[in-house]
Amino acid sequence: MTKGVAVAPERPVSAAMPFSRHLTRTARLAGPVILARAGLLVMVAVDSAMLGHYGTLSLAYYAAANAAQVVMILIGVGLLQGTTILVAQAHGAHDRAACGTFWRVSMVHAVALGVLMGLLCLLGRWILEGTGQEPAVALGGGRVLDMIAWGSPPLMMWVVCSHFLEGISRPIPGMLVMFGAVLLNVLLNWMFIFGNFGAPEMGAEGAAIATSLVRWVMFAALLLVVLRLPDGQALGVSRRVTDFWAVSRRLRRLGYPLAAARGLETTAFAALVMLAGNLGTVPLAAYQIGYNLIGLVFMVAIGTAAASMIRVGNAVGRRNPTDIARAGWAGVLLIACLMACFAGPFLGLGLPLARLYTDDPAVLPLAASLIGICGIILVFDGMQAVLMGALRGIADVWVPPGLQLISWWCITVPLGYVLAFLVGIGVDGLMWGILAGALSASTLLSGRFLAVARRPIARY
């Protein structure tokens, strides 16, 4: 029985679905989520490309500001991810009215987080100076963050609306809104970066203004979708919340470890970037190429992980342990197959892929070698991401971050350092460290899912 929310009586355990149906439904749900998540990266890539044509200095300002805000965004998304878990479990249990309650309380959290992020952005110049950026870059990046600040609240509210719709297995609106947002972002960049259509020419600050405007449009569009759902009343979208603080505590108890997990992974990979920089500019450039390619393909894993979290959460709501296990392993099988498809080109086309980023003869062979290792990493990194999603669907959120701490900070970073600097493999050693960490994480999380999925599980 759900804590803190009036819910419908628990239904008896339903019959388990065949594994093939779990696989099909996970794939159908993952597709739109993958495209929606990829849209966020596409917008950053478009901003970078357009600013690169405008001027190198503007691109540097944008890059510095983006590095600062990405950390805040990832932690904010982690804090709000409990929305998906609780909505998916409630939806699976046919406790539809509770779904809207979770959405409404999460929206309050999103506003508070967005305002806090905006205030931190207004301190951007001093934050960038504190991280060792050159004064000119800190000043320019700070001005960019000033423009980003007022787009932070709608971004967090968009995240909650997106999580809500995904939790009730309706990801298509989020995908369509993202497609429109990408196109609008290009148009507004053209106006405010270059000064077209009568707009002022503002360079990096113009890209930031465009980003903030797009975030408000994204939120408004998705909010309209939620408010106009045909079954919105049954889902409790307009229902008065009578137990706000109880629901808020549940969301925060889920959000804290989820944010910590994102922070552990993000800081570990940031440490590897700094280690690559200590090897020199050429190894750093090669490492960035490989890391960027992994990041692009990893959107597939993020989407599949979200779908697995929702499918497992639905099974928890139905109180069906067989479906919980099948939903989780269906996601793992799906991502293993998808990542294996990407691994082939990474292993066989390292040099052509590297040429998409650089013509530097010193960087190309190093990047090609790293891309080959990245192809192997993809499979295990994708598996650990999906296993994390499956465990989140069960609301097992405290132990998995500990397992990630072991994998990323006790294996990846130390082993990468030893191989790169002490053994003398160089930048390849950093990638082998990531592979070891991904293999460790996927193994440990597999064991954890096997153990937890066998236990009697109730809604969180």
Image: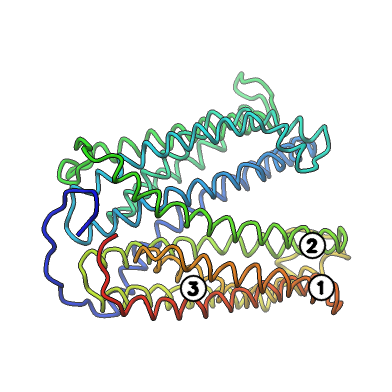
CA gap between label 3 and label 2 equals: 30 Å
Whichever of labels 1 and 2 marks the residue nearer the N terminus, that label is: 2
Quadrant assignment for the N terminus? bottom left
Label 1's element?
helix
The correct choice, above or below, for 270 with respect to 144 in the image is below
Label 2's element?
helix
Rendered residue at 61%/42% (across/down): 69
Whichever of labels 3 and 2 marks the residue nearer the N terminus, that label is: 2
Circles 1 and 2: CB atoms closer than 8 Å: yes
Q: Amino acid at mark 3?
A: Leu
* Mark 3: few/some/many CA within 10 Å (<14, 14-19, 20+): some
The correct choice, above or below, for 438 with respect to 201 in the image is below
Q: Amino acid at mark 1?
A: Ala
Q: Which residue is mark 3?
A: 338
Q: Which is more toward the observer, 443 or 193?
A: 443
Give how far across and how far down residue 315 sits, in percent. 26, 68
Q: Which is more toward the observer, 104 or 4?
A: 4
Q: Which is more toward the observer, 195 or 82?
A: 82
Q: Amino acid at mark 2?
A: Leu
Q: Which residue is mark 2?
A: 275
Circles 3 and 1: CB atoms closer than 8 Å: no
Rendered residue at 82%/58% (across/down): 277
Label 3's element?
helix
Q: Which residue is mark 1?
A: 420
CA gap between label 3 and label 1 equals: 30 Å
